[in-house]
Image (cartoon, helix red, strand yellow):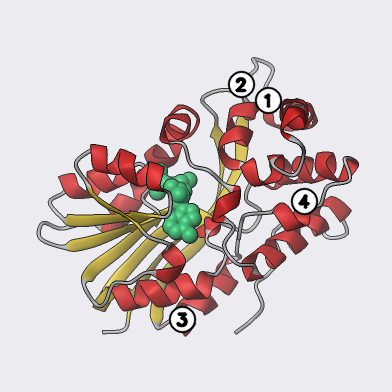
């Protein structure tokens, strides 16, 4: 299997190189779930767009009445509910008990489970995953579990952060943490693969890849970049003492303002998604 390609960015740029190294190292580390806490209320406030922008996955999934579908990393269940509304029997799994509780409050079948240690056996027609796979730092374990969970010929439809995702934000975090003597490489909680690398992993796990592509998607944020950092960059923020957290966020925001905030004060994030459809051998 080819090595995962580094994240995008200009070659020879030390900050981009550091981000690449972190992404590669992250893919080899054990899960760092403890470094990230998912609060469904904060998530709704700062990241409701994540599930909204995942809606195209449903067009690719085409959930049918009577099918059994697994939503991997279901969060508080916004997309899971849409799959259920299509008439499929959907099970959502997520490692965050708080997110699972919020999904259950919607009346969904949601369970606390680590995506790197799925326990299903040949029981789903399809697996969907939106914005969750890049938090799972052992991708081969995830893919083994997804393959085991699917019936023969089952489909796997997903979108995750891909090569180059939030690179501007990551570079700013790296710069501010390094200036404080902290080690951002150790903290990086994300795995943002290139299409070729992830396709190789999918094929090694027994999937035929029907489509896979990077989709640059600069994304307007519902508020300031600080809300995004609090919601998604906790692992980095924890590298400084708690009473320095707000100062760190303010500093990172000032680094990012020229590139991610427009003249009207509207913030965006430099998302790059990796979207794919794969099918398990029949
Ligand atoms: C950005 S949210 C996406 C949630 C949902 N799919 C959506 O579209 O709104 C990422 C989710 O992945 C979950 N997650 C992260 N690591 C996980 C793991 N190892 N196993 C299961 N879920 C995980 C988090 O708890 C979180 O709810």
| Of pointers 1 and 4, the one earlier in the residue sequence | 4
| Of pointers 3 and 1, the one earlier in the residue sequence | 3
Are discs 2 and 1 less than 8 Å apart at CB?
Answer: yes
Asked if residue 132 shows in the view, the reply is no
Label 3 and label 4: CA atoms lie apart by: 32 Å
Are discs 3 and 4 less than 8 Å apart at CB?
Answer: no
The extreme left residue here reads 66
Splitting the image into 4 quarters, where does residue 280 fall? bottom left
Whole-percent x, y for residue 157 in the image = 36, 62
| Of pointers 2 and 1, the one earlier in the residue sequence | 1
Label 4 and label 2: CA atoms lie apart by: 27 Å
Q: Name the residue carrying label 3.
A: 203
Q: Label 3: how many residues lie within 10 Å, few (<14), some (14-19) or many (20+)?
A: some
| Disc number lying in front (1 or 4) | 4
Whole-percent x, y for residue 71 in the image = 32, 56
Q: Name the residue carrying label 2.
A: 266
| Of pointers 2 and 3, the one earlier in the residue sequence | 3
Q: Tag 4's secondary structure?
A: helix
Label 2 and label 3: CA atoms lie apart by: 41 Å
Give the camera-side residue of 130 and 75: 75
Give the camera-side residue of 240 and 225: 240
Q: Tag 3's secondary structure?
A: helix
Whole-percent x, y for residue 52 in the image = 38, 38
Q: Label 2: how many residues lie within 10 Å, few (<14), some (14-19) or many (20+)?
A: some
* Quadrant in the picture for the N terminus: bottom right
Q: Name the residue carrying label 1.
A: 261
Judge from the rendering whether residue 83 lies leftward or rightward of residue 194; answer left or right: left
Whole-percent x, y for residue 277 in the image = 38, 66
Are discs 1 and 4 less than 8 Å apart at CB?
Answer: no
Judge from the rendering whether residue 144 lies leftward or rightward of residue 9; answer left or right: left
| Of pointers 3 and 4, the one earlier in the residue sequence | 4
């Amino acid at each position: 299997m080819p090595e995962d390609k580094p994240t995008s960015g200009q070659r020879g740029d030390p900050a981009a190189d550091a981000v690449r190294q972190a992404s590669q190292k992250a893919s080899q580390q054990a899960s760092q779930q403890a470094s990230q806490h998912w609060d469904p209320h904060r998530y709704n406030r700062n990241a409701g767009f994540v599930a909204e922008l995942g809606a195209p996955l449903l067009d690719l999934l085409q959930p049918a009445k009577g099918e059994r579908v697994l939503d991997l990393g279901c969060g508080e269940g916004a997309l899971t509910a849409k799959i259920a509304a299509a008439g499929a029997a959907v099970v959502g799994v997520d490692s965050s008990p708080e997110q699972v509780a919020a999904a259950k409050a919607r009346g969904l079948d949601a369970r606390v489970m680590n995506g790197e240690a799925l326990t299903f056996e040949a029981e789903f027609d399809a697996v969907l995953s939106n914005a969750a796979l890049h938090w799972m730092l052992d991708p081969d374990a995830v893919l083994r579990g997804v393959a085991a969970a699917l019936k023969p010929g089952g489909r796997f439809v997903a979108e995750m952060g891909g090569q180059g995702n939030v690179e501007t934000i990551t570079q700013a975090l790296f710069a501010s943490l390094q200036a404080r003597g902290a080690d951002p490489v150790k903290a990086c909680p994300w795995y943002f693969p290139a299409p070729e690398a992830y396709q190789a992993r999918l094929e090694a796990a027994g999937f035929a890849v029907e489509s896979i592509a990077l989709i640059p998607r600069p994304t307007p944020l519902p508020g300031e970049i600080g809300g995004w950092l609090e919601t998604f960059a906790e692992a980095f923020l924890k590298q400084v003492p708690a009473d320095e957290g707000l100062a760190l966020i303010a500093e990172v925001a000032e680094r990012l303002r020229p590139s991610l905030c427009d003249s009207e004060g509207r913030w965006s994030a430099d998302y790059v998604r990796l979207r794919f459809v794969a099918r398990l051998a029949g």
